[in-house]
């Protein structure tokens, strides 16, 4: 694939201010995603994956601070945006499926009301149009559109997760950041949704940053994979290389930890 | 059911229906549990797997007595669930069954230390035997979940990793004295290595302490390390029940087969073309529709499994 960097991150540093002083969660990270590419980001819990996801959208909140580096999206310097530009840009250009967002849906609004709020704010279109778009997206993620009028607690965990995915697609963004988007789904639906996203992606050409600790799943879906350890990216390569020819010891260790049906690794 | 001399947990014909009011159309019913029956011996573990929205969490919550079921019967150790009235009876129920949830953060109070989270149940449930002290029991409980008491007791939830938080949730269930733990996707937010250590921990608690587990999970590849039996759910019903090894390696029901064949493997790519996606989706839809339409009963197979026709 020819290089056409839609996202280009250079020397990104993110600190958390703690009582013991700043804690550097992301340490001088370089990474890029080409237009239409799926980049996987894997690494153990606490290595800084979600911190990167938030920082890329400038959704990080104190005590987190971006203390160095640059983020360029489609040629624009994201760190230079003022608040208004940022609000327009977010969800339109880049959207984020938060980790455990299914637990963060607003409990007092129906699924449709939450959907309509975002749609209204960004497009100014009518409730009727919002309804049509919402129904289309619900079908896409395999939920009966009548459930648009349910409150979050009336949906199962996996259904809420699918609602969150649908929300990220509302405005047809060019980059979607997915932080553990399918952990709450059964594997059949997980596969259907990833296939659907892959299909949409091939059609519309958006890029994806796909964060998960399920390496097997990532290998099925990503074009390239970046492996992260304690705030650093220790290895980036084509998926095939990461699967068949991992270089870094840590990448090898991650593969060894993957459970499989046929060995007895699950319980020592 | 299978030969169960003296079940610790017994569900018989359990039903639960939710009624949904919609803004536009008429009210809609969701049959979350339909005629669910199974039993579990003390010290054994059962995996509850299946479709998202098939009623797994509802089943877990019903057993924990969190709402009234619409029909059928649930008994834990001979006591009918949902009949506790006095606070003493409720405490006794709590001792029999505790739940551990998916999000290890959401279920801990951010303003309280680990010490607080464990002291309360120990005191409330009189879990300090004669000759022992509160400090002894705290230490013992933390050691049971493989945490260092000195390093952990005064910490707040946000100072712990996801895996450590989930250990605290298990410790809390132990502090109450729970004999049955319902773990609803306890590892799905943890990365692989930590997932394994939590699974190991549950297995140890089962083998060494005789704790009974209902393990709700989407992680089919690891479920059979912990559990003797697996129940596969679809649309509020159990479609297959039997030894976990058999179900994982040789599923019988069409939906179980579909589920097992969809477990991700690094060797197969997700295809980006719609035709391919449609083929799989159409096939999955067909299996789901057939499964949903069937009201055939569970029948015993030659190898001792129960499979819905
Ligand atoms: N509000 C905070 N204050 C202080 N430290 C924090 C805060 N939030 C996160 N951290 C720390 O930053 C590091 C990176 O956290 P992050 O959530 O990005 O990890 P992650 O790779 O997404 O992990 P997981 O796989 O568990 O989601 C961790 O060491 C974490 O403890
Ligand atoms: N409080 C409620 N009100 C209305 N409907 C509900 C309620 N709780 C659950 N349901 C519905 O009951 C069905 C079963 O839900 P349940 O949460 O038990 O599924 P699950 O098997 O745990 O799914 P998942 O794997 O996605 O967590 C779903 O259709 C769900 O929407
Ligand atoms: Mg994260
Ligand atoms: Mg559930």
Image (spheres, coloured by chain):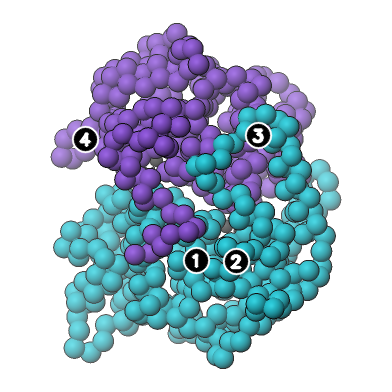
Rendered view: B173 above or below B158:
below
Chain letter of the residue carrying label 1: B
Instruction: Say if mark 2 contacts mark 4, CB within 8 Å.
Output: no
* Label 4 beta carbon within 8 A of ligand 1: yes
Q: Which residue is mark 2?
A: B247
* Residue density around tag 4, few if under 14, some if 14–19, many if 20 or more, within 10 Å: some
* Residue density around tag 1, few if under 14, some if 14–19, many if 20 or more, within 10 Å: many
Instruction: Say if mark 1 contacts mark 2, CB within 8 Å.
Output: yes
In this rendering, the label closer to the viewer, 3 or 1: 1
Q: Secondary structure at mark 3?
A: helix
* Label 1 beta carbon within 8 A of ligand 2: no
Instruction: Say if mark 3 contacts mark 2, CB within 8 Å.
Output: no
Looking at the rendered structure, whether the residues under marks 1 and 4 are on a common chain is answered as no
Q: CA distance from mark 4 to mark 3?
A: 39 Å
Q: Is residue B276 left or right of residue B117?
A: right
Rendered view: B286 above or below A91:
below
Q: Which residue is mark 1?
A: B224
The chain that appears purple in the image is A
Q: Which residue is mark 4?
A: A23
* Residue density around tag 3, few if under 14, some if 14–19, many if 20 or more, within 10 Å: many
Q: CA distance from mark 3 to mark 1?
A: 30 Å
């Amino acid at each position: 694939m020819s290089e056409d960097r839609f996202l280009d991150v250079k020397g990104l540093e993110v600190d958390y201010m703690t009582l013991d002083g700043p804690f550097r969660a992301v340490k001088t990270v370089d990474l890029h995603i080409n237009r239409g590419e799926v980049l996987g980001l894997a690494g153990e819990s606490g290595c800084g994956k979600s911190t990167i996801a938030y920082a890329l959208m400038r959704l990080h909140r104190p005590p987190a601070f971006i203390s160095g580096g640059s983020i360029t999206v489609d040629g624009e310097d994201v760190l230079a945006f003022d608040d208004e530009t940022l609000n327009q840009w977010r969800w339109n250009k880049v959207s984020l499926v938060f980790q455990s967002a299914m637990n963060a849906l607003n409990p007092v609004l129906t699924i449709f009301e939450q959907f309509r709020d975002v749609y209204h704010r960004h497009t100014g279109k009518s409730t009727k149009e919002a309804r049509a778009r919402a129904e289309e997206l619900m079908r896409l993620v395999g939920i009966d559109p009548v459930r648009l009028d349910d409150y979050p607690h009336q949906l199962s965990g996996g259904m809420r997760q699918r609602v969150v995915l649908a929300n990220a697609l509302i405005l047809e963004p060019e980059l979607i950041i997915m932080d553990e988007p399918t952990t709450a789904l059964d594997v059949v639906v997980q596969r259907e949704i990833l296939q659907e996203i892959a299909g949409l992606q091939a059609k519309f050409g958006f890029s994806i940053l796909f964060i998960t600790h399920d390496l097997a799943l990532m290998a099925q879906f990503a074009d390239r994979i970046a492996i992260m350890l304690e705030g650093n990216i220790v290895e980036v390569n084509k998926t095939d290389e990461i699967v068949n020819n991992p270089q870094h010891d840590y990448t090898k260790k991650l593969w060894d930890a993957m459970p499989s049906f046929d060995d007895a690794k699950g319980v020592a | 059911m299978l030969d169960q001399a003296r079940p610790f947990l017994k569900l018989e014909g359990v039903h639960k229906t939710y009624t949904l009011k919609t803004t536009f159309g008429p009210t809609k019913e969701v049959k979350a549990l339909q005629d669910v029956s199974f039993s579990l011996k003390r010290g054994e573990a059962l995996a509850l797997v299946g479709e998202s929205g098939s009623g797994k969490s509802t089943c877990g919550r019903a057993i924990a007595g969190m709402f009234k079921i619409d029909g059928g019967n649930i008994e834990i150790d001979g006591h009918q669930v949902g009949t506790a009235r006095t606070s003493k009876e409720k405490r006794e129920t709590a001792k029999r069954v505790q739940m551990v949830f998916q999000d290890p953060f959401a279920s801990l109070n951010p303003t309280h230390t680990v010490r607080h989270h464990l002291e309360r149940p120990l005191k409330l449930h009189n879990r300090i035997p004669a000759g022992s002290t509160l400090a002894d029991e705290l230490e013992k409980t933390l050691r049971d979940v493989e945490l260092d008491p000195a390093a952990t007791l005064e910490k707040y939830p946000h100072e712990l990793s996801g895996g450590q938080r989930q250990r605290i949730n298990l410790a809390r269930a132990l502090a109450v004295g729970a004999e049955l733990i319902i773990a609803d996707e306890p590892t799905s937010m943890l990365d692989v290595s930590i997932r394994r250590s939590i699974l190991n921990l549950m297995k140890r608690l089962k083998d060494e302490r005789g704790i009974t587990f209902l393990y709700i999970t989407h992680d089919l590849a690891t479920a059979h390390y912990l559990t003797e039996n697996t129940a596969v759910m679809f649309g509020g019903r159990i479609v297959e029940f039997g030894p976990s090894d058999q179900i994982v390696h040789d599923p019988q029901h069409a939906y179980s087969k579909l589920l097992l064949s969809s477990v991700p493997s690094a060797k197969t790519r997700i295809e980006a073309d719609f035709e391919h996606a449609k083929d799989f989706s159409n096939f999955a839809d067909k299996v789901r529709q057939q499964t949903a339409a069937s009201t055939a009963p569970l029948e015993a197979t030659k190898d001792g499994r129960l499979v819905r026709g």
